[in-house]
Image: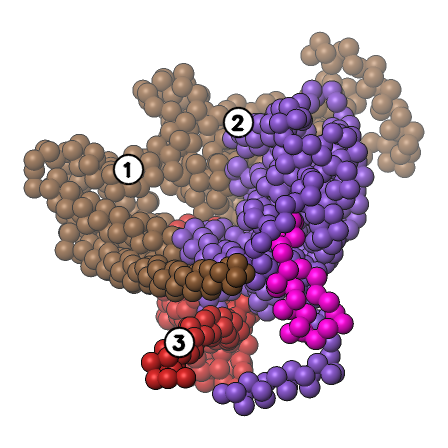
Amino acid sequence: MKAAWIVLPALLATASVAAAAEPASPAAPRGVGGMCGVCHSEVRVQFEQGIHRSEGIACTTCHGGDPTATTVEGAHRGGFRGAPRRRDIPALCASCHADVARMRPYNLPSDQFALYQTSQHGQRLAKGDPNVAVCTDCHGVHEIRRRDDPNSRVFPRNIPSTCARCHGDAALMKKYGRADNPYADYAAGVHGIAFLKNGSDAAPECTRCHGSHGATPPGLGDVEKVCGQCHATTRQYFLEGPHKKAMDAAGLQECATCHHHHHTPPASVEMLDRVCLQCHAADSAQQKLAATMKTMFTEAAQEIDRAHRLVEEAGRIPLYVEDYKARLEDARTSLMESFPVMHALNPSRVEPHTRRARSIALEVSSEIHAKLAGRFWHKVGLGVFWFYLLLTAAILVRARRRAAAEGQR
Amino acid sequence: MNGPEKTALERRGALIWLIRGFLSLWAFGAGVLGLSFLRAPSSERRPGERQLRCGSFSSLAVGEARLVRAGAEPVFVVRVSEAQITAVSAVCTHLRCVLKWDRDKGTIQCPCHDGAFDRTGNVLSGPPKKPLPQYPAEIRADEIIVHT
Amino acid sequence: MRARAGGRRSFRTWLEARLNLTEIASFLSVFGLLPAELDTRKPLREALDEALSQPLPSHARWPRILGILSFILFLVLSVSGMMLSFYYQPTASEAYGSVTSIARDVTAGTLVNQVHHWAATLLLLILAARIIRFYFGGMYGRSREVIWMLAMLTFTVATFADLTGRLLPWDARGYWTTVRAREVTDALPIVGPVFSFVVGGPGLDSLVLTRFYVLHIIVLPLVLLVLFYLHFSSARRVGLSAGAAPPSNRSLRVTLYDLLLVIVFLIGALVTLAILLPQPFDTAADPFTTPPGSRPPWYLLGPHALLESFPPLVPRFLRGAFLEALFAAVLFLPFLDRRSGERPGRRPMAIALGIVALLLWAVLIWKGWHLEASR
């Protein structure tokens, strides 16, 4: 409060200026901050950028006190609460945000507090852990912005960095027995690269899998449901295959066992060489099944590659290859479709897709070979042309010789 | 002029005509080459005339779509209403899979990663970022023509 | 048979009474295809007989075929270019499509296209070879200054014709080659702005393409035609080699057969090159992506390397001015080197200088090629 004493003359001066400017209502608290902003000017600047200011929420709504008082003591009297303690913050916010009637005009949900209490954050807070996230850690303290404000910490693009404020802190995570760094892992995985680097809004940020207010790691049997929100086809085939039951029984995290939950590598057929060995022996029937699927896929992929190169080669000549390009796209689609099907772990279901891809590619290759063979006839034609040309030259040489002989005579 | 000399002359004359005939093949060849070069290619293959004929308009029910495979990219022709059609590319903007028409939902679905587009090509859900390219379409004498 | 021959003759005399066929045929000699002058007052047959029995003029004797070869190539380019223009569309949006359509959908389109390409390449090589031969043969001395300058100008105009042709397909290679080539021309103090003015600005868009097209198919060919005419005219006046040629007993008729043989083998070479070594097609030009390794065309690689090998302090227009001074020095060489008319053995300095210049040129081309690879 020392600082307040120092600025007191300034406060009095400002107050008198304000009184001179507004003689009609000298005591009325102008603006939402009332007199609070005179001392707490930095806070006031932050607060005025937030959403609460325009909705008539004042400092006193959360902090109590008297906004009309012109002395420091007077202002900090009358139900003044000061800065709320961390563990009181959720309940404080909930005093408005859990009120259905008050939230209705804004079309805001009112169940966040209830959700929060079920989350890992909420449960640990209830046990007295001071480190876990409360409302203000993600939404800001005074500068609480709308979710669709790009400067907001909870704007979808900013969510990974907001979560990383704690979950990217290795020292803090160590306290909870976590050796990994979820944020770094996410950023290096296929989703993180798509979201952070390539700017894809379709790629998930943290809350798409974990939820926001009710943030909790998905339970053991639920990983496929979470991933299946986007990878619906893959999930369907996974559920039809034998892994679902077996993994649940063994306590394995379904999708994450092979694909890793944060550091998800781009799916590739080469994964079949590695991931199965985590559980199955190298000479087991299961590994052989994986090898079969991989062979099917790579054979088709190679055939498409070969056809693609031929199409490119023919296009450079140039031959008309647009139709072949369209058919190769078709083949690639079939090949892509075989990826989700592989999760059913049944080669006979993968086979129709890879076989179709392969047969289209083979067809295209053979047709282009036939077209390229047409170029062979160009060379035959060139031979005939040269035969004809040399014969002409012979006639000309003969005629020339005769002309030379005549000239001599 | 006696006999053998005459035949020698005749043979010589024949040879000269043979040679002339042979040499005139050059002109013939050049003429054939020139004329075949001048023969204009069929209308579909003329530059700047990339029009796709997408079948009859009346046989396409309202709310139905038709996949047309021709040229470099397959195209979906959707009859939006009684008189209106739209044409969008049928190649997913995510990983270039060829899309499928979902009759029940009236959307275009990707079989690979479950991306979904509406009938004008906007992304509804799934991994694709960009909407499907749309092509101008018109109806000429009950035939749908798409300009790709 | 005799009656038909007589009939033909009578038709010729009928026509001859109405048209001066000899004068028309003398056009052949104007462009060196007939290395003799026809007496236009006499009827065609008579004038031809007279000309064909004449001894050969010195400038038409073997191995003086580079000039005539270049003109034949010019004719081949004119005919194939005219055929291509039946299909080509000179707008940025349609150019690439029309060129691929020529090569793909038109019967013999690839052949015509590739013959055009190879004839252009051979023309430039032959024009360059002609300059080199003139230099080492000392054929730029007294009274032959104009021939030398015309050879230089013909080569320069032909390179411009080639340059404008490279952009027309609007493919990635042609587009970026042109961009890099304009980097060189823009450095030249007066030529650069004039060229930029003529083609309609420093960028490359549809308007510039149309202007390149008009330059390529009308303006520059006409200039080339005039230069060829002047060249042959001057060659007829002064002859090519120094000193009086010994009288030849070989008649013109024989030379005409030689010429026909040359034409036949030239066409054979062009068709063979077109079929066995076709220039592969590149993708359509994308003004927003520069493909790696795009360079100026080969005849500008030397100037390009020269421009880049100055110390960085020298401003670009000074480098361009130096290039222009070099060009002017070569163009006016006959006035600078007064001993040029003599035999090679009698002017060792000039021969040595020529060899050094050629080697330097080769090194500059090599350097210009590797300028891009090293970046």
| Colour scheme of the rendered structure | by chain
Observer-side mark, 2 or 3, equals 3
Which residue is at 88% across, 29% downward? A19
Outermost bottom residue: C3
Q: Label 3 is found on which chain of the structure? A: B
Q: What shade does chain A have? A: brown
- Crowding around mark 2 (Cα neighbors within 10 Å: few <14, some 14 to 19, many 20+) is few
Which residue is at 31% across, 41% downward? A267
Q: Label 1 is found on which chain of the structure? A: A
In the rendered image, residue A324 lying in the magenta stretch gets the answer: no
In the picture, measured across the screen, residue A122 lies left or right of residue A83, that is left
**Looking at the colours in the rendered structure, which chain would you say is drawn in red?**
B
Pinpoint residue A109: horizontal percent, then vertical percent.
50, 47
Pinpoint residue A105: horizontal percent, then vertical percent.
59, 52
The residue where tag 1 is placed is: A259
Residue A58's place in the image compared with C17, above or below, is above
